[in-house]
């Protein structure tokens, strides 16, 4: 008999339908991967099982958990169920914990509200569970607050909170999406171990097919509020029947076609670059301690080349990118673009800026919401000074930049909130292209985008690179993306470049210990 | 936490020093001769010389500043020119009215505002929320002197529960509290209205936070999640506003003090300014600055008690 049965569930919030007849089953101890793109309804399906829906949500259909009717259950019955028999882990470890409560107390709270144990007994339960999830008290004191922990450690606290009472079902909503590759591997390991040891069923919600491939027994693929395909991992991934599933798998392993070997001479030369940050003073009149974020980094990018920069958060890759773009002063070393120094007299040299543009991770946050798209895209043209085009010439430049990324030029009069995530990232690329730079730096530019859109953006970037001949510096923690679109890769750890070489060589035969860990940790979908 | 307190205390003392210097310079140096200003146009040179001697204006500037500081440190603010009594006595007497009044009003406003704000946030967009926010809108819009006169009409003139004004002194604490009740209500109403709105919007923001959803997923009821997780996280803006309001109540109660004929600090400042008694003006301003900076210091400490993330280091 199955533990969870969801049968023909429909859900609408206000007038917007979210789920249109979802059906799935989870057996006791089974790991179900619930896969889909953003807006497909996978999180709402999970929240329906907990009956923890937003205000104004109307739900119909049948949901049974362990023989109990969830749809008909009273709030009192649901409160008793949540946290005790069904545990849930959320995506954002940074915000999912109460910042004002110690981690020990937060784990103990779950035990306190569901059982009649006293304060000290609940503490003991919490202590044991925190140790089980890899946070022993002697290393990470349980009287610490969430802000004193790293993202991975916070996610461990979130897991401890959800499983301290050994629920029959654990729901994990994108539990590793916000984490580094190696941290992701550790958290997935932990979840796998818990499920095996405690005999819990796990509903693993993710957009990443590679994660599901390594974790789940069965898969349910969701699209537009419906489960379009269900089956074992092997069935679904090896022989998908549904068209959408096929598309999703193809997009996940998509490698854009690029013409290689059109590289010129040295475009960007980074030589012995160092960047120190001042740390907060430890004593009132003591000296300022510094932290070296970038440590003697040297490399060259040739004209027309596509180079990847991989490393975990805190490895210094974003600082390096900002220093290259002249957004940061440097402590030592120099950056030359076309032989010209980017940092002249401590400030960024204006003349070199027009040859470099950047595309950021968050396409929405990097645009002014009150300016029309045409004006946003035209912005870099002011770097041309008095030579900037005006009037009809300006409009022509904007139109052709938008056309190059596949946006109708007629849409230049709209505001950024009227576009989808993928379109926004296209507009960000148009903004970078309009000034015809020699180098485009992309900082996690496709990380937040759904796989099918990501495949299109990668195609677009490859095509633009081939046609216009500019070079790319791809900063990413996603080895799949780097593998797909770069010629060469630089691996960064602790502020240093620890390994560099042709992408295929480095990722297939990593030499440095850190690269080996990184490659081993990255989940891969056998294509 | 000790380091935090040490840093905050040093910054408190530094702010006080800077403020005293500014007050000293503005009143003593900038407009010319304070003695001439205090005596007005038709005055004899002898009277001027005598006042200059009394004010200590014959001494060099740094010596005068240090002398003033040293005097204040031992509670000597000089002799009032108009009242002919030590300024310190004047101020202490007035503080015994203004400080209790401000605390009374702040307590009332907090006791009203927090429950109203929490109820409104918990029933967001419901009937309670709608009516509570409508009432606070009126509370902000009503001029408090007019509201004060309504209170006098209703409770002093018609019902005769309270006296309509004046202050009997603290010899009879019951009578003193009675005398301060109507003014405190008049002062508290607009403050409570603002505070309730801040409490509501801050709590609505925190109720949408991920950790509140986490708390619900752990099995807490809506009410438990609100009291145990959301409320404390929502307090920072509320404490900020309370600090600002207390500073205002201490010095800004002058209109209400006039309506109820209370001998408070605001009235003293007003009378001293009208009488050109610069010695009293300077001392009252210094006391108010001291109060505001101290309140800011206490608010900073309250932040640190509420939020462990703010304990680590002082700016």
Image (cartoon, coloured by chain):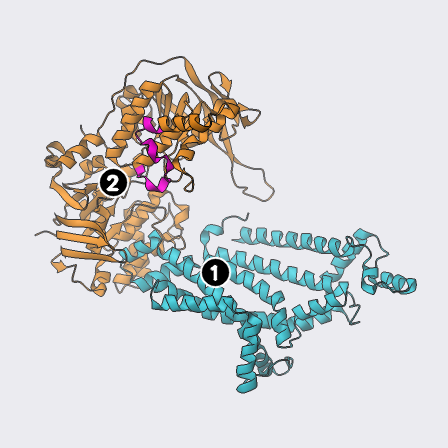
Chain colours: A orange, B cyan
Residue identified by numbered label 2: A188
Comparing B159 with A61, the one in front is: B159
Residue identified by numbered label 1: B238
Q: Mark 2 — on which chain does it sit?
A: A
Which corner quadrant of the image does residue B149 belong to? bottom right
The residue stretch that appears in magenta: A402-421
For disc 2, the neighbor class at 10 Å (few under 14, some 14 to 19, many from 20) is some
For disc 1, the neighbor class at 10 Å (few under 14, some 14 to 19, many from 20) is many
Comparing A392 with A86, the one in front is: A392
Magenta stretch encompasses residue A147? no
Task: Please indicate whether residue B173 sits to the left or right of residue A34 in the image.
Answer: right
The answer to whether B247 is drawn above or below residue A389 in the figure is below
Task: Please indicate whether residue A81 sits to the left or right of residue A391 in the image.
Answer: left
Badge 2 marks a residue whose secondary structure is: helix
Task: Please indicate whether residue A295 sits to the left or right of residue B81 in the image.
Answer: left
Q: Is residue A520 visible?
A: no
Comparing A401 with A467, the one in front is: A401
């Amino acid at each position: 008999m199955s533990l969870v049965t969801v049968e023909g569930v429909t859900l609408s919030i206000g007038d917007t339908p979210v789920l249109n007849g979802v059906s799935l089953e989870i057996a006791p101890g089974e790991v179900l991967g619930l896969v889909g793109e953003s807006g497909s309804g996978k999180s709402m399906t999970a929240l329906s099982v907990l009956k923890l829906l937003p205000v104004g949500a109307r739900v119909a259909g049948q949901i049974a958990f362990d023989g109990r009717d969830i749809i008909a259950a009273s709030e009192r019955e649901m409160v008793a169920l949540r946290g005790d028999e069904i545990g849930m882990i959320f995506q954002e470890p940074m915000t999912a914990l109460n910042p004002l409560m110690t981690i020990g107390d937060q784990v103990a709270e779950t035990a306190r509200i569901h059982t009649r144990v006293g304060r000290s007994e609940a503490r003991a339960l919490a202590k044991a569970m925190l140790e089980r999830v890899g946070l022993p008290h002697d290393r990470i004191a349980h009287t610490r607050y969430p802000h004193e922990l790293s993202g991975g450690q916070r996610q461990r606290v979130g897991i401890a909170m959800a499983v301290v009472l050994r629920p029959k079902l654990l729901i994990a909503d994108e539990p590793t999406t916000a984490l580094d590759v190696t941290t992701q591997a550790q958290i997935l390991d932990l979840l796998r171990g818990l499920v095996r040891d405690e005999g819990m069923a796990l509903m693993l919600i993710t957009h990443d097919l590679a994660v599901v491939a390594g974790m789940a027994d069965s898969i349910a693929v969701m699209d537009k509020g419906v489960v379009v395909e269900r089956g074992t991992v092997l069935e679904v991934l090896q022989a998908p029947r549904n068209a959408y599933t096929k598309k999703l798998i193809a997009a996940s392993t998509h490698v854009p076609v690029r013409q290689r070997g059109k590289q010129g001479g040295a475009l960007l030369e980074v030589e012995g670059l160092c960047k120190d940050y001042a740390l907060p003073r430890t004593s009132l009149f003591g000296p300022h301690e510094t932290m070296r974020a970038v440590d003697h980094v040297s490399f060259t990018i040739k004209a027309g080349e596509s180079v990847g920069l991989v490393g975990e958060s805190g490895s210094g890759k974003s600082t390096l990118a900002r220093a290259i773009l002249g957004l940061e002063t440097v402590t030592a070393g120099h950056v030359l673009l076309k032989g010209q120094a980017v940092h002249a007299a401590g400030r960024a040299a204006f003349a070199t800026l027009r040859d470099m543009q950047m595309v950021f991770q968050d396409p929405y946050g990097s645009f002014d919401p009150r300016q029309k798209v045409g004006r946003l895209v035209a912005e870099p043209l002011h770097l041309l000074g008095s030579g900037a085009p005006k009037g009809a010439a300006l409009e022509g430049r904007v139109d052709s930049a938008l056309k190059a990324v596949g946006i109708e030029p007629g849409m230049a009069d709209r505001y950024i909130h009227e576009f989808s995530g993928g379109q926004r990232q296209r507009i960000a690329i148009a903004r970078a292209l309009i000034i015809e730079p020699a180098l485009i730096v992309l900082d996690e530019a496709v990380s937040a985008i759904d796989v099918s859109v990501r495949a299109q953006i990668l195609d677009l970037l490859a095509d633009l690179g081939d046609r216009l001949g500019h070079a790319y510096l791809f900063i990413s923690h996603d080895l799949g993306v780097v593998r797909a679109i770069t010629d060469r890769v630089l691996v960064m750890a602790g502020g240093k470049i620890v390994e560099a070489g042709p992408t295929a060589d480095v990722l297939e035969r990593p030499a440095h210990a850190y690269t080996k860990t990184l490659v081993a940790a990255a989940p891969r979908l056998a294509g | 936490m000790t380091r935090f307190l040490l840093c905050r205390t040093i910054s408190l003392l530094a702010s006080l020093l800077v403020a005293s210097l500014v007050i000293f310079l503005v009143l003593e140096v900038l407009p010319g001769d304070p003695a001439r200003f205090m005596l007005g146009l038709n005055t004899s040179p002898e009277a001027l010389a005598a006042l200059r001697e009394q004010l200590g204006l014959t001494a060099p500037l740094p010596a005068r500043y240090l002398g003033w500081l040293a005097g204040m440190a031992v509670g000597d603010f000089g002799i009032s020119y108009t009242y002919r009594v030590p300024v310190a006595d004047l101020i202490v007497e007035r503080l015994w009215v203004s400080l209790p009044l401000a605390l009374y009003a702040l307590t009332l406003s907090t006791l009203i505002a927090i429950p109203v704000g929490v109820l409104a946030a918990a029933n967001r967009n419901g009937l309670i929320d709608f009516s509570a926010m409508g009432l606070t809108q009126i509370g902000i819009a009503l001029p408090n002197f007019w509201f004060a006169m309504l209170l006098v009409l209703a409770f002093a003139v018609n019902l005769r529960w309270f006296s309509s004004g004046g202050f009997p002194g603290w010899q009879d604490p019951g009578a003193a509290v009675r005398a301060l009740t109507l003014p405190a209500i008049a002062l508290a109403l607009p403050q409570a209205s603002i505070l309730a709105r801040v409490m509501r919007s801050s709590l609505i923001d925190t109720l949408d936070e991920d950790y509140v959803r986490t708390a619900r997923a752990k099995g807490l009821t809506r009410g438990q999640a609100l009291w145990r997780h959301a409320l404390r996280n929502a307090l920072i803006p509320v404490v900020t506003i309370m600090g600002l309001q207390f500073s205002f109540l201490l010095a800004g109660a002058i209109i209400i003090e006039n309506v109820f004929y209370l001998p408070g600090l605001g009235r003293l400042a007003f009378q001293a300014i009208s009488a050109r008694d610069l010695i009293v003006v300077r001392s009252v301003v210094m006391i108010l600055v001291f109060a505001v900076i101290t309140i800011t210091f206490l608010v900073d400490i309250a932040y640190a008690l509420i939020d462990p993330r703010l304990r680590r280091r002082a700016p």
